[in-house]
Amino acid sequence: DGGITQSPKYLFRKEGQNVTLSCEQNLNHDAMYWYRQDPGQGLRLIYYSQIVNDFQKGDIAEGYSVSREKKESFPLTVTSAQKNPTAFYLCASSIVGGDNQPQHFGDGTRLSIL
Amino acid sequence: GESVGLHLPTLSVQEGDNSIINCAYSNSASDYFIWYKQESGKGPQFIIDIRSNMDKRQGQRVTVLLNKTVKHLSLQIAATQPGDSAVYFCAEGDTGRRALTFGSGTRLQVQP
């Protein structure tokens, strides 16, 4: 089955530590996205990539970094500079970049602070 | 900034009844709208979408209505079932923007 796989499902971070969340898709989609979801709130865009080797900051990029070396993969690193990292992180993809088509989501990674 | 919002944070309905979830948007340039369903601990799941050249679109047990005059979007679920219990998000986009803008969601509770 084609889809988006996020791992791990749960992740714990110590103070001062960087952690990396994995996102892999086999849908042959060009565009990929990272969102943050806090309890009772909507999704906020962290980073997006419309094509391999290119990515752009979203609304809340501070304290996060990404790479897009392969079409299938768009890992997100939560750095120690992100002072409030506890949240549910969602990765999505779409056929091409832009906002007038469906985005398909993975099942998320829940990040907590130890 | 412009945003997408929802009128009702929680909607409780009886099994078998029809449900209507509402969404207001403020960006008059928006030309694409989409509804997602999110179950606890999972990612949002696509339900149905509609473009601004339409005012109604039907899927299996779901209908989306778009009123561009008052910038209002609704999702109707027919014969609501317990499996429909979830949080429902609307999202909007306009040509040239980088990604969809999401609302904060409405929780649908189906009572048996």
Image: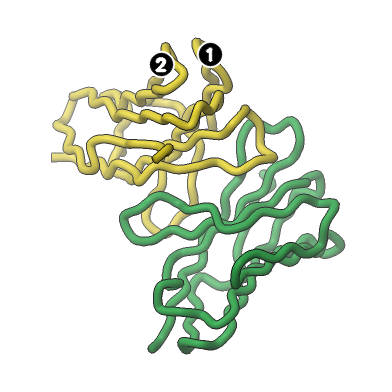
Chain colours: A yellow, B green
Tell me the number on the disc at residue A54: 1
The subunit letter for the residue under badge 2 reads: A
**Disc 2 on helix, strand or loop?**
loop
Residue A45 x, y percent position in the rendering: 51, 36
Looking at the rendering, in which quadrant would you find the N terminus of chain A? top left
**Disc 1 on helix, strand or loop?**
strand
Mark 2 or mark 1: which comes first in sequence? 1
B66 on left or right of B23: right
**Residue at the disc numbered 2:** A67
Query: Can residue A99 be seen in this snapshot?
Result: yes
Residue A5 x, y percent position in the rendering: 34, 36
Residue type for callout 2: Ser
Tell me the number on the disc at residue B50: none
The structure residue drawn at horizontal position 81% and vertical position 44%, both measured from the top left corner, is: B29
Query: Can residue B104 be seen in this snapshot?
Result: no
A6 on left or right of B93: left
Seen in the picture, residue A101 relative to A54 is either above or below; the reply is below
The structure residue drawn at horizontal position 56% and vertical position 58%, both measured from the top left corner, is: B47
Residue type for callout 1: Asp
